[in-house]
């Protein structure tokens, strides 16, 4: 794929206004996510990779964090109350002893040590979101397939530690995990998308419970990394990200603002990647297409935001390629039997397959509910192809062979004429040259009939 981003430069305006925009990564979170991505190579996990390959190894707790991690929320709360009460009692006792028995001194001592105990308990409690974030990281990194993470699992982890998913430390870890996942899903370099990246990212985003703005910020973090590493990968990120956020992408993905690229360059990224994935979809389509198939193809085209004109051209090209496969097979069989007076049955089968496929495309192209169908349906013609002149000799040979087979009884009825006319159009032969071939075949057949 070709994307002219070489001349694109980071926008000077972005550098001065990034911190002020709610739609751009905060400096702290952006640096944290970038640092995490910085030490990791490309890992494409749309096809399932282990968590540690995507998010790095386990994180270890330090200081009093292991104690905090070991205490359930209810026990931790009770212990905090006990610590404060014990400190207040000790303060009251000291105030009484050294304050000459004064009630005021006793109360003051209780207040001082009680406040100190409360501050200590608050300090311990402030570590809980950080400990919860480590627990979240280790849980997700320990999964065999992080793409299968469910929202209930994330909520259970937050509940286990008694924190909100909106706590700063916990949310920062959610964002970091998301950025790492997005980065790992985008294929490196010239490797093509597989088609399941958008679905995988949306599923993981929902599992983490991130809103669009926070998630979009992480796409920009990943974009900064990929922009430096590979413009092909950066192009794929633009395409995938725009599909992940749909219509909102225009407002929450500031590609032009941050990277100094143009609408035209974004359009190229969208078009070329959509073509690549649509071509991949068409490869799975054979000659036995039906209504369900062409409806599904249309849905795929719309999902990839591929223009109708391009989709139609690609479908017609695919149909021509399928027909050319039958032609090549028939010619190979025919040429392997030189001088034979009988046309091999396999040759007739190949041509009949061409006619049946073309007839099916014609019928589907005229269907009254055709707006729901794939673009490009209709009869196929090889006429006008750039290499048609080179092929026309072989096409005439195959046309003559088929005509010989169907006119072997010397009778040219309407049904046979329709089939020969349809084959003529598919092969892109002129009417006069096709008629000349039929007349030659008919004359030859009659000459072989005993008087």
Image: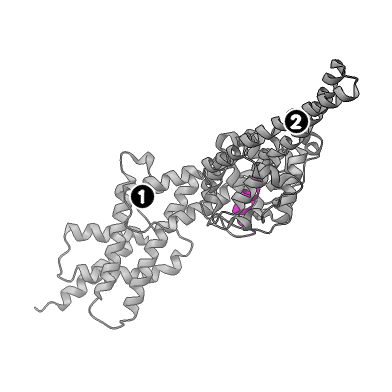
Q: Position of residue 369 (x, y in %)?
A: 33, 39
| Residue at the outermost left position | 451
Asked whether residue 418 is in view, the answer is yes
Q: Position of residue 361 (x, y in %)?
A: 33, 52
Q: Viewer-proximal residue, 198 or 339?
A: 198
Rendered-image quadrant of the N terminus: bottom right
Q: Position of residue 198 (x, y in %)?
A: 54, 46
Indicate yes or no whether the magenta region holds residue 27. no
Q: Which residue is mark 1?
A: 293
Circle number at residue 137:
none
Rendered-image quadrant of the C terminus: bottom left
Give residue 145's quadrant in the image.
bottom right
Residue range in magenta is: 179-189
Q: Main secondary structure of the magenta part?
A: helix
At 47% from the left and 65% from the top, the residue drawn is 387
Indicate yes or no whether the magenta region holds residue 185. yes
Left or right, residue 139 beside residue 370: right
Q: Viewer-proximal residue, 267 or 385?
A: 267
Left or right, residue 159 beside residue 108: left
In space, the residues marked 1 and 2 are separated at their CA atoms by 74 Å
Q: Position of residue 173 (x, y in %)?
A: 67, 43
Q: Viewer-proximal residue, 231 or 138?
A: 138
Q: Which residue is mark 2?
A: 86
Give residue 349's quadrant in the image.
bottom left
Left or right, residue 363 beside residue 216: left
> Under tag 2, what secondary structure?
helix
């Amino acid at each position: 794929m070709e994307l002219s981003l070489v001349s694109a430069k980071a926008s000077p305006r972005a550098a001065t206004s990034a911190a002020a925009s709610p739609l751009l990564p905060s400096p702290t979170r952006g640096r944290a996510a970038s640092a995490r991505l910085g030490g990791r190579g490309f890992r494409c996990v749309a096809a399932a990779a282990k968590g540690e390959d995507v998010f790095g190894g386990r994180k270890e707790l330090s200081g009093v964090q292991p104690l905090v991690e070991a205490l359930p929320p209810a026990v931790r709360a009770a212990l905090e109350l006990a610590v404060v009460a014990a400190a207040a009692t000790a303060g009251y006792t000291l105030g009484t002893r050294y304050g000459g028995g004064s009630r005021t001194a006793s109360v003051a001592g209780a207040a001082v040590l009680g406040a100190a105990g409360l501050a200590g308990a608050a300090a311990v409690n402030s570590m809980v979101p950080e400990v919860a974030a480590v627990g979240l990281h280790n849980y997700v990194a320990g999964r065999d397939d992080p793409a299968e993470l469910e929202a209930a699992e994330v909520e259970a982890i937050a509940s286990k530690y008694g924190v909100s998913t909106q706590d700063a430390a916990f949310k920062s870890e959610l964002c970091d995990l998301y950025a790492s996942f997005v980065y790992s899903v985008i294929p490196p370099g010239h490797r093509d998308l597989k088609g399941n990246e958008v679905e995988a990212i949306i599923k993981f985003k929902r599992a983490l419970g991130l809103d669009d703005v926070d998630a979009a910020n992480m796409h920009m973090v990943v974009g900064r990394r990929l922009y430096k590493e590979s413009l092909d990968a950066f192009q794929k990120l633009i395409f995938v990200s725009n599909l992940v956020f749909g219509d909102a992408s225009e407002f929450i993905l500031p590609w032009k603002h941050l990277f100094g690229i143009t609408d035209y360059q974004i359009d190229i990224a969208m078009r070329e990647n959509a073509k690549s994935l649509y071509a991949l979809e068409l490869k799975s389509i054979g000659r036995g297409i039906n209504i369900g198939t062409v409806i599904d193809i249309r849905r795929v085209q719309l999902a990839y935001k591929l223009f109708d004109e391009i989709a139609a051209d690609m479908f017609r090209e695919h149909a021509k390629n399928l027909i050319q496969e039958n032609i090549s097979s028939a010619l190979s069989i025919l040429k392997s039997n030189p001088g034979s007076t009988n046309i091999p049955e396999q040759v007739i089968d190949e041509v009949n397959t061409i006619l049946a496929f073309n007839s099916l495309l014609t019928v589907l192209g005229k269907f009254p509910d055709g707006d729901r169908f794939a673009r490009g349906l209709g009869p196929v013609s090889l006429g006008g192809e750039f290499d048609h002149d080179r092929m026309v000799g072989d096409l005439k040979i195959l046309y003559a062979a088929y005509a010989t087979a169907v006119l072997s009884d010397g009778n040219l009825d309407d049904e046979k004429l329709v089939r020969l006319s349809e084959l003529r159009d598919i092969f892109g032969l002129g009417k006069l040259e096709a008629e000349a071939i039929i007349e030659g075949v008919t004359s030859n057949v009659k000459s072989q009939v005993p008087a």
